[in-house]
Image (cartoon, rainbow, N blue to C red):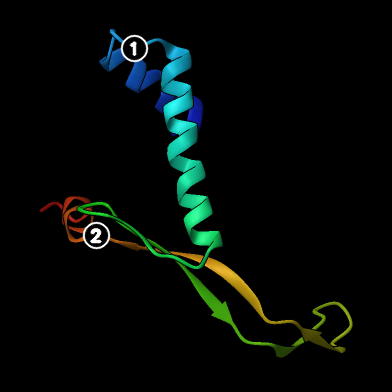
Amino acid sequence: MIRSELVQKIADENPHLYQRDVERIVATVFDEIIEAMANGNRVELRGFGAFSVKQRDARTGRNPRTGESVAVEEKHVPFFKTGKLLRDRLNGG
């Protein structure tokens, strides 16, 4: 499902809301999740999962084409851990 499909589904299930309002709501939710993660916070949506940021240490990597050693800088990556309800539903529970 892509963002526009999500907006359309919410709009279809809530005919009292204008589509532009639903678009704004979805954008606000995503923006707040991104902002919280950018500030180093964890975002938990009960039953769905938790978004967090993990730090990857600097390391020495290899260029696959030449085999040459390359310094890879420390970086922060997004991480998602599924909630129990979602995990159970995916596994037929």
- In this rendering, position of residue 54 left or right of residue 85: right
Q: CA distance from mark 2 to mark 1?
A: 29 Å
Q: Is residue 33 above or below residue 25?
A: below
Residue 62 position, x and y percent, is 78, 86
Which of label 2 and label 1 is nearer to you?
1
Q: Return the disc, 2 or 1, that comes first in the chain's sequence.
A: 1
- In this rendering, position of residue 49 left or right of residue 25: left
Q: Amino acid at mark 2?
A: Gly
Label 1 packing within 10 angstroms: few (<14), some (14-19), many (20+): few
Q: Residue at x 35, y 21 (%)?
A: 9
- CB-based contact (under 8 Å), mark 2 and mark 1: no
Is disc 2 placed on a helix, strand or loop?
A: loop
List the residue tagged with mark 1.
17
Q: Is residue 17 above or below residue 85?
A: above
Residue 20 position, x and y percent, is 48, 15
**Quarter occupied by residue 22:** top left
Question: Given the current orientation, which residue lies at the most extreme left position?
Answer: 93
Q: In this rendering, does residue 46 appear at all?
A: yes
Q: Nearer the viewer, residue 1 or 92?
A: 1
Label 2 packing within 10 angstroms: few (<14), some (14-19), many (20+): some
The circle on residue 76 is none
Q: Nearer the viewer, residue 41 or 72?
A: 41
List the residue tagged with mark 2.
83
**Quarter occupied by residue 63:** bottom right
- In this rendering, position of residue 91 left or right of residue 74: left
Q: Is residue 43 above or below residue 76?
A: above
Q: Residue at x 50, y 25 (%)?
A: 4
Q: The N terminus appears in which quarter of the rendering?
A: top left
Q: Is residue 86 above or below residue 53?
A: above
Is disc 1 placed on a helix, strand or loop?
A: loop
Q: Amino acid at mark 1?
A: Leu
Residue 8 position, x and y percent, is 41, 18
